[in-house]
Image (cartoon, rainbow, N blue to C red):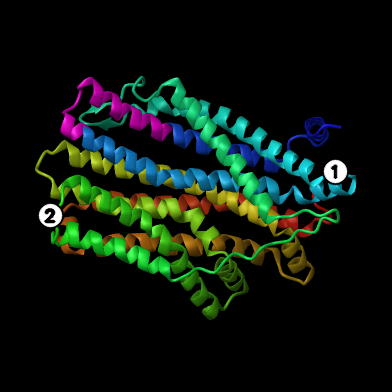
Amino acid sequence: MSTLRLWMRLARATGARATDVLSAIAFAFATAALLAVLGGVNAFRVRLETGVVEPADGGLVLTLAFIAAALLLPAVWTLAQAAVRLAVARRDDRLAALRLAGATRGQVTAMAVLDALAQAVVGVVVGAGLALAVTPAIAQIQFQGIPFAPGELLPPAWVWLAAAGAVIATALAAALASLRRVHVTPLGVAQRVRPKRLSLWRIAGFGLAAVAYVAVVVLDLIPAELSVSIALLAIVVLSYSLIGPLVIQGIAWLVAKAARRPATLLAARRVVDDPRGAFNIVGAMAIAVMAGGFASLAPVMAAPGDALSVDISTGAALTIAIAGVLGAVLAGIAQSAKVLDQRREHQAMHRMGVDLPVMRAALVRQVAIPLVVGVGGAAVVALLLILPMFMFWIASPESVVTWVVLTIGAVAVTLGATAAALPLVKRVATETAAA
């Protein structure tokens, strides 16, 4: 029997599972966010090419739009990875059964890829519809002194096809990467590879970017054009992803040492064991928060009535809001995947007498620790780097309050989304066989 026919028969026999639905939802949000960001970039491009705005200001805004898109792309990639991992987490037993029935490793690998492909295609279709649905709302936002026209926010058809292809390719790449880490034998034994330890070179990489920013932008020791300053700022913000996992791991280790409650100890130890995975959930939000801190300087550093400073503040707020939504979806999906992936651990703890409330509290704190540390650290770094201009910064309370409120709101929404994974704890801990 061919692999495709076997996969179709299994799909009809088992039907759509909750994990399949959640994976499709993750792909849908990733697609919608990507299309919304590309729509904004396209709108600024159209305005610049048609002469609606001044070439200098239009070119700068288009550059900032590309930077904002670059800040959000890691979240789209991580969300797609989480979607694939969620499906893989419940696939081990089925793959093991197929191997026992005589299926080859190539066949089970192909079926895993077909699963990811089907979920990604459904997610792309739903995400495209979601992007179209939110386009009228986005059109109400004013940039460059005028609101968007719905037509501006709709890129050419080839852009939509490229975005859909990128999401599907990401799904396939993530599926293949996950299968490299899990080798399914005929007895269903999964061989897990321990992640590599984080190295201290990450600190040096971030330090070099920060020193260059301070020397060129803050102290003006090296004359540079505005485009160079913006590029250095973008490098500093993106390089936070180097030290983010290291900082989270260090703080989680201290929390584990000082823990007085079992849930706190369990959550901290899990974060210490996988700091990269913990940062992936909050990384995009942390980077957006840092960029928003820098952008909050725009209103006071610009000339009175400067529309560009308003655009920068609005763009930063929109970036944080999108990153917050993606972070919330990612937190719910990733934690669901972890609960399912660690089902044997939850079952063992339950048999040993660990209460379900303790396991649920550990799950929430497993997100809260990296969330507070990652986002809080990003805010602190932003404040330190704009310290020489601090008096100007606090002179614009509106932008500061907006930045703080959006940051707190994004953190709260993400923690709230984690509750979506809590019902799985009881189901996984008390089940006698994998569903």
In this rendered view, identify the residue nearer to me: 363 or 190. 190
Dot 2 falls on a residue whose secondary structure is loop
Q: Nearer the viewer, residue 99 or 302?
A: 99
Q: Which disc number belongs to residue 232?
A: none
Residue 162 rendering spot, x and y as whole percentages:
48, 29
* Amino acid bearing label 1: Ala
Q: Is residue 226 magenta?
A: no
Q: How many marks?
A: 2
Residue at the image position 73 percent from the left and 49 percent from the top: 90
In the rendered view, does 109 fall on the left or right side of 162? Answer: right
Disc 2: which residue: 223
* Lower position in the chain sequence, tag 1 or tag 2: 1
Residue 109, how many percent across, how many down? 73, 44
Q: What is the span of residues highlighted in magenta in the rendered image?
A: 36-58
Instruction: Give the residue drawn at x 25%, y 23%.
Output: 49
Give the alpha-carbon distance from disc 1 to disc 2, as whole Å: 65 Å
Quadrant (top left, top right, bottom left, bottom right) of the N terminus: top right
Q: Is residue 170 visible?
A: yes
Q: Is residue 224 above or below residue 308?
A: below
Q: Whole-percent x and y of residue 63? A: 27, 39
| Residue 103: mark in rendering | 1
* Amino acid type of the residue that numbered disc 2 sits on in the rendered structure: Pro
